[in-house]
Amino acid sequence: DAGVTQSPTHLIKTRGQQVTLRCSPKSGHDTVSWYQQALGQGPQFIFQYYEEEERQRGNFPDRFSGHQFPNYSSELNVNALLLGDSALYLCASSLAGVETQYFGPGTRLLVL
Amino acid sequence: GESVGLHLPTLSVQEGDNSIINCAYSNSASDYFIWYKQESGKGPQFIIDIRSNMDKRQGQRVTVLLNKTVKHLSLQIAATQPGDSAVYFCAENDSSTGGTSYGKLTFGQGTILTVHP
């Protein structure tokens, strides 16, 4: 049973560029949440997707956007990258109506 | 906004000892809590969860205790092993903004557990 997968594992970008991160949920899950984890901090909720719609959003600017596809996979897009966007981006999947979220390995983004 | 915090940022124990990791939460409306283990370079791994209508739940070598009166959560690890060395996070489900199905998790800062052989 495949767990949550994310790609790429690492990414280096420069300020002002745009980035797209990808996530495939755990088999049988239909809900995807994205988190940002700065070094030495706990993950912070960005947003959650269910039925291809953003259902809930954390305190992140509009530069952060996402998408969910009919197969439940998801993308996180970040525009106009800032140095402060450097972090580990985590995807978590769950089943609608069940709180337990399972995390992927993350994508390490470095903005220079 | 509401947040979840940890009392002890680091904990060092000897192999075979029992470990207790504590967590304080401030949102009295939270009804679901979860513990994760995160090893270096990896994503958080689910350990155990508990709903607010319970005060104790046991898993394999782990026990979570919930004290709603003082808004305190703890994770007990029995017979701690070197492989248990990691950062441990508690998180709460923010159900107040849309029901439990939305599942926004609010994380604490984390506790670094180091197990010495």
Image (cartoon, rainbow, N blue to C red):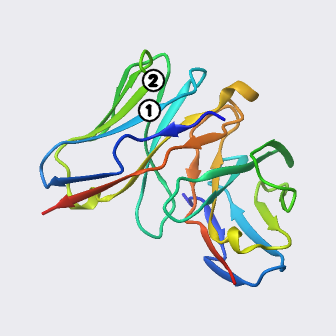
The residue carrying mark 2 is B71
User: Within 10 Å of the Cα at label 2, are there few (<14), some (14-19), or many (20+) other Cα atoms?
Assistant: some
- How many discs appear? 2
Name the image quarter holding residue B68: top left
Earlier along the polypeptide chain: callout 1 or callout 2?
1
Q: Could you say where residue A95 lies in the image, as x and y percent from the top left?
A: 66, 40
Is residue B103 in view from this perspective?
yes
The residue carrying mark 1 is B24
A75 left or right, relative to B48: right
Measured along the vertical axis of the image, is residue A46 above or below residue B54? below
Measured along the vertical axis of the image, is residue A7 above or below residue B57? below
User: Within 10 Å of the Cα at label 1, are there few (<14), some (14-19), or many (20+) other Cα atoms?
Assistant: some
- The amino acid pointed to by label 1 is Ala
Report the front residue among A61 and A10: A61
Name the image quarter holding residue A87: bottom right
- Say what secondary structure mark 1 lies in: strand
- Residue at x 69%, y 69% (from the top left corner): A84
- Residue at x 62%, y 65% (from the top left corner): A5
- Residue at x 78%, y 80% (from the top left corner): A15
Q: Distance between the residues labelled 1 and 2?
A: 6 Å
Q: Do the residues labelled 1 and 2 touch (CB within 8 Å)?
A: yes
